[in-house]
Amino acid sequence: MEKQLERIGLVYHPDYNMDLGPHVFPARKYQMVYNLVKQDPKLASLYIYKPESAREKDLALVHTEEFLRDFFGLKLTERTQYSELPLTKQIVQSFVLAVGGTILATELTEKYRFVYHIGGGFHHSMPDRAEGFCYLNDAAIAVKLYQLRNPGKKILFVDLDLHQGNGNSVVFQNDPNVFTFSMHQENLYPKKETSGMDVPLEEGTDDQTYLQLLENSLERIVSSFRPDLIVYIAGADPFEGDSLGDLKLTFQGLRKRDKAIRDFALKTNARAVILPAGGYAKDFHDTVTIHYNTIKIFAAD
Ligand SMILES: [Zn+2]
């Protein structure tokens, strides 16, 4: 008999709050999501796990030696500059810690049905270069380690960020045990890679169209791929108030999106790691609210 799983685990570290200077990426959102969790009577009692930094040999499961050398050496080169982020010691440490957080979250699926990492989801990072605010691909590294410990297990990426999860599409392109599914606005960064399934969306896509496409896609995927572990990239940027995108999902629509993934995981008896990824709402607090709502949905019975 399967041992009883606890419902939700949380992972967070205060050092995710890195100083990026004046930048569109709101790194202080992690701390604010954490604060909301601590103030929530239903969530405040949950134990919050604090990760350690990932080891360099873990990073090397995905990233090339040349890229890691530039990154740790704080060198702006063709391998690091497309992060479009500054490169300081603090930022390096914060990313290495966030990788440790997603590794820990993935390990904790031994104990919890769902684990939300208040950090991570840097899905544009490629093996040999940084891209789009992402230096290290935390989820790809965590999945590689998970595979070493759990050979043969099936892993499904459900990437519902505004942007295509191009890094994971590339890393797992030839891995039959990993299926990458990405639903994203088509006419935006990044240059598209080929995922297991891509669902390109037009500008102005609303709740109803989005949720219908999501349901149809999940049904198609599960007809041939039964996941043991889902990595849910729960970006806040499909939101109608986002400054980088043109999708029109409402708060309510995003809650239904999260609920669809939660119910899909329960139905398929898969564990899930949930990562916040992007979010650039014109009102910064909306991004925080959307991530917080995701935690509440996965924590609910
Ligand atoms: Zn995004």
Image (cartoon, grey):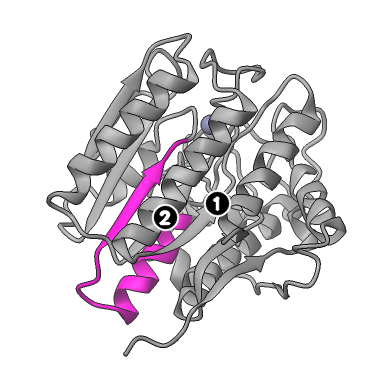
Q: Position of residue 185 (x, y in %)?
A: 42, 20
Residue lying farthest to the front in this orientation: 301
The residue at which mark 1 appears reads as: 275
Gap in angstroms between the C-alphas marked 2 and 1: 8 Å
Q: Position of residue 128 (x, y in %)?
A: 39, 46
Q: Please tell me whether mark 1 sits on a helix, a strand or a loop.
A: strand
Tag 2–tag 1 contact (CB < 8 Å): yes
| Quarter-of-image position of residue 12 | bottom right
> Could you classify mark 2 by the number of other residues whose Cα lies within 10 Å: few (under 14), some (14-19), or many (20 or more)?
many
Confirm whether the magenta stretch covers residue 157. yes
Q: Is mark 2 within 8 Å of ligand 1?
A: no
Which numbered disc covers residue 231? 2
Confirm whether the magenta stretch covers residue 138. no
Front residue of 274/254: it is 254
Magenta segment range?
139-160
Is 257 above or below relative to 208? below
**Residue name at image x 65 percent, y 64 percent:** 97
Amino acid on which the number 2 mark rests in the picture:
Val
Q: Quadrant of the C terminus?
A: bottom right
